[in-house]
């Protein structure tokens, strides 16, 4: 079937793998031509030749010099791979020979309507009689016979070539190069006019021109209709091909199961397409909504623009009115002169105010410099005063210490003793008249403890005065140094963490250094909640329930709690009054704990533990849980039970550590038969409450709540180490006991004591402490069992002796009778 003109300069050549063998496509911007060769080899040969001719045409277009024609051919041959043509299938001989194929040999099964398409296209492209053959216009030169090096090639048919049709060889003519005579012949054939009619542009009349234009328009309309018909037929052809391909695939399946699966696959594809259609519809609806919104916004913006235009117009009117007013004012000479005078006066006032402002600024700058200088001088004077006061306290402390040592010297005569005693009395009485003394408001610290303890014995009063001076001197010297650094460290640590604190070496080091007063409540609450989290989560309303139970059902230990309640922290102002709210809170905490742990109920010393917790945490419930964590989580079991077995075992462990860490002092105690447990037992039971000053006690508790009972052993050994030299000087057992009873209250340097406890006492592993405890606890339990056995034997022997005595008395009475 003739195709007419096919422009190959902008065409592409493709073939589909799934198409029928020998079928390939020529795609142009206007349409796609589908052709069929006899075999696959011939198809590849045609594709290669088409590529070669297109390449030659491109090279000739870029370099029209005919001398370079051979070079272009060589370039194309080098660029494209050489493909030998199938023998006997192409060339001029094959074109001239009669075809032995059947008329339906080139009919495509997959493209049954391609003949209709090519026929319509051939009607549109038919230009001259030679157009019946398929010609590819590639070059302006005429066709030359093929050389011996390149065999001639035949043109493939458009799916159906009649047997009597002999396609001539390929012609190399440029696309679109048609002579005017050929064009006129073409139009004459289309309009069925006489072939001999020749049109000359100069001799045409206006009527003939209009008639030709009308005919041209009719032809253009006809061509447009033919194009639409071709497009419709092309769409119908594609639909038919798709339907035929689907039916062929369905019929090609062998079993019903495969066909059913194919139908299901098609149904899934249809469902997928329907889903995509729904999505596209939704997207279109969304776009329409957005378009409506944009339209509404556009209307709103247009309204705003209108309002702004109106405002601008109004402002322009106001400006015009003001301009007219200014013009009218300037037209009047008197008013204009008055305005100028007022402007000059205002300028003078502005200059005067500027000068005054500069003067005042200089005065303020000078006053600021004077204030800064005086502030710095005041700070330096305060620091100097603190150092002077500290040195004065140290000198006075040394003076009183010297007087005390003179008082203990026995070689003095009576007059000297009286003089020393008089000087001591003057030093004690002169505290009220002393220029450098403690502020009345600072008699108690932040938690209500007395800074200077009170003693009844005169000698101890002198020691209290020495201690107060040392504490005062120490506080004055450390105010500007370690306290500020410690506060900054804690502030930086807490700022980067939440309410809950987790165990870490950094937290352990900070707790050993002590917690500043402003952060102690928060840190204690976090540590206590970490130790009692499981119990509190299981019973969130535990404290309220225990308080209600203690109110409705008194515990047997309530009488002992009432007796010990008023003997709690007598040196603290919060517990000094019987009607103090702190005492009422302490009562509820102890009664609730007696029901929380019935095995213990109440033990003397628990009141002091709860009181310290209440002073720091300022909350009944938090103080209750702090007491629970100390008794049930930190201290060993049976520490506060009736027989205090674990407490006694700890005293034996302390003696072992004392012999290892401080062998000289331990030997000194053994030489004088000193039992340190008589003093240290209360230290361990109440964790040094009322045994240490508050500024040392609270840092001890900071580390104790986090690390546990080993802190108690560390501080107990540190106290003996701190006063080791003074204790070794005392050679009397009574004086040693008397000194051990109050020496802990004379400790003034808490930093030094903490350094001894946590540095000099190392190593102090917890495993060693647990092993020692288990060892002494087992021995103590065995001794208690033996003691109980001896008590039972003694009771039985006493009963037997009593029975014998009663029997002898009865026999004597009978003899008398």
Image: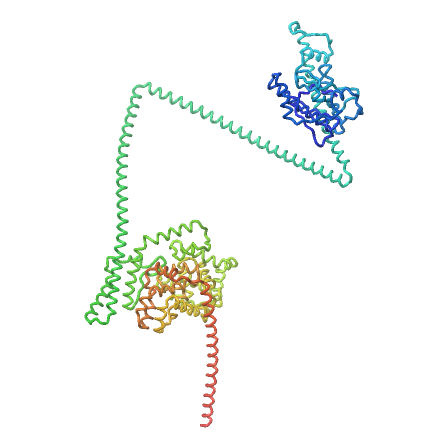
Can you say whether 431 is above or below 810 in the image?
Answer: above
In this view of the protein, can residue 591 be seen by the observer?
no
Could you tell me residue 108's position as x and y percent? 76, 27
Q: Which quarter of the rendering shows the N terminus?
A: top right
Residue for point 30% across, 70% down: 730
Q: Nearer the viewer, residue 221 or 776?
A: 776
Could you tell me residue 315's position as x and y percent? 42, 25
- Number of marks present in the image shown: 0
Q: Nearer the viewer, residue 149 or 229?
A: 149
In this view of the protein, can residue 718 be seen by the observer?
yes
Could you tell me residue 523's position as x and y percent? 42, 55
Q: Residue furthest top?
A: 203
Name the image quarter holding residue 417. Answer: bottom left
Locate residue 713 relative to residue 166 in the image: left or right. left
Locate residue 518 relative to residue 400 in the image: left or right. right
Can you say whether 735 is above or below 378 in the image?
Answer: below
Name the image quarter holding residue 28. Answer: top right
Q: Residue furthest front?
A: 148
Could you tell me residue 268's position as x and y percent? 70, 38
Name the image quarter holding residue 624. Answer: bottom left
Coloring applied to the structure: rainbow
Can you say whether 239 is above or below 765 in the image?
Answer: above
């Amino acid at each position: 079937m003739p195709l007419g003109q096919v422009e190959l300069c902008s065409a592409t050549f493709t073939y589909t793998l799934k198409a029928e063998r020998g079928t390939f496509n020529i795609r142009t911007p206007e349409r796609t031509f589908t052709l069929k060769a006899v075999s696959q080899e011939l198809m590849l040969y045609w594709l290669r030749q088409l590529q070669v001719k297109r390449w030659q045409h491109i090279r000739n277009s870029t370099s029209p010099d005919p001398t370079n024609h051979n070079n272009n051919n060589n370039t194309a041959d080098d660029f494209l791979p050489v493909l030998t043509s199938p023998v006997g299938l192409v060339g001029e001989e094959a074109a001239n020979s009669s075809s032995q194929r059947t008329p339906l040999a080139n009919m495509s099964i997959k493209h049954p309507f391609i003949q209709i398409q090519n026929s319509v296209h051939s009607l549109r492209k038919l230009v001259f009689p030679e157009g019946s053959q398929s010609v590819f216009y590639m070059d302006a030169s005429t066709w030359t016979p093929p050389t011996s090096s390149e065999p001639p090639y035949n043109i493939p048919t458009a799916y159906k070539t009649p047997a009597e049709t002999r396609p001539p060889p390929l012609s190399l003519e440029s696309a679109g190069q048609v002579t005017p005579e050929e064009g006129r012949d073409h139009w004459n054939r289309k309009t069925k006019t006489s072939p001999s009619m020749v049109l000359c542009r100069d001799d045409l009349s206006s009527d003939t021109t209009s008639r030709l234009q009308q005919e041209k328009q009719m032809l253009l309309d006809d061509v447009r209709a033919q194009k639409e018909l071709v497009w419709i037929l092309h769409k119908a052809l594609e639909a038919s091909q798709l339907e035929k391909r689907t039916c062929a695939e369905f019929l090609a399946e062998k079993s019903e199961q495969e066909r059913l699966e194919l139908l299901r696959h098609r149904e899934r594809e249809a469902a997928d397409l329907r889903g995509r259609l729904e999505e596209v519809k939704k997207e279109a609806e969304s776009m329409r909504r957005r378009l409506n919104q944009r339209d509404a916004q556009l209307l709103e913006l247009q309204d705003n623009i209108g309002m702004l235009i109106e405002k601008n117009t109004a402002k322009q009117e106001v400006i015009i009115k003001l301009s007219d007013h200014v013009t009218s004012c300037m037209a009047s000479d008197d008013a204009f002169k008055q305005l100028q005078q007022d402007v000059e006066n205002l300028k003078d006032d502005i200059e005067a105010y500027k000068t005054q402002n500069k003067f005042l600024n200089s005065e303020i700058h000078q006053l600021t410099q004077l204030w800064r200088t005086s502030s710095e001088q005041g700070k330096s004077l305060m620091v100097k005063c603190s150092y002077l006061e500290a040195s004065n306290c140290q000198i006075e402390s040394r003076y009183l210490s010297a007087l005390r040592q003179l008082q203990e010297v026995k070689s003095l005569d009576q007059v000297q003793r009286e003089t020393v005693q008089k000087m001591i009395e003057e030093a004690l009485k002169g505290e009220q008249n002393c220029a450098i003394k403690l502020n009345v408001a600072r008699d108690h610290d932040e938690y209500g403890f007395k800074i200077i303890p009170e003693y009844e014995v005169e000698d101890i009063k002198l020691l209290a005065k020495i201690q107060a001076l040392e504490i005062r001197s120490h506080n004055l010297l450390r105010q500007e140094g370690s306290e500020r650094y410690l506060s900054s460290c804690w502030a930086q640590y807490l700022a980067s963490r939440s309410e809950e604190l987790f165990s870490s070496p950094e937290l352990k080091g900070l707790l050993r250094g002590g917690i500043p007063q402003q952060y102690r409540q928060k840190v204690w609450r976090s540590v206590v909640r970490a130790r009692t989290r499981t119990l509190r989560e299981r019973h969130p309303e535990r404290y309220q329930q225990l308080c209600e139970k203690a109110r409705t059902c008194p515990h047997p230990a309530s009488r002992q709690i009432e007796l010990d309640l008023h003997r709690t922290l007598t040196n603290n102002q919060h517990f000094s009054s019987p009607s103090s709210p702190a005492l009422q809170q302490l009562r509820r905490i102890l009664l609730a704990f007696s029901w929380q742990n019935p095995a213990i109920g109440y033990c003397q010393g628990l009141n002091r533990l709860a009181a310290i917790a209440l002073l720091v945490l300022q909350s009944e419930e938090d103080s209750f849980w702090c007491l629970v964590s100390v008794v049930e989580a930190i201290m060993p079991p049976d520490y506060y039970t009736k027989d205090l077995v674990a407490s006694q075992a700890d005293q034996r462990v302390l003696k072992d550590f004392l012999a290892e860490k401080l062998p000289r002092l331990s030997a000194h105690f053994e030489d004088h038969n000193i039992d340190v447990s008589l003093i240290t037992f209360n230290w361990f039971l109440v964790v040094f409450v009322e045994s240490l000053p508050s500024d040392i006690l609270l840092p001890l508790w900071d580390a104790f709540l986090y690390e546990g009972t080993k802190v108690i052993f560390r501080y107990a050994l540190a106290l003996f180490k701190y006063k080791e030299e003074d204790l070794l000087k005392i050679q009397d057992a009574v004086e040693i006991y008397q000194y051990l009873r109050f020496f802990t209250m004379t400790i003034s340097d808490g930093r030094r004591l903490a350094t001894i406890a946590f540095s000099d006492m190392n190593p102090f592993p917890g495993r060693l402490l647990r092993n020692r405890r288990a060892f002494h606890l087992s021995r103590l339990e065995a001794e208690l069992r033996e003691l109980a056995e001896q008590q039972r034997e003694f009771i039985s022997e006493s009963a037997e002796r009593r029975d014998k005595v009663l029997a002898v008395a009865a026999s004597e009475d009978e003899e008398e009778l």
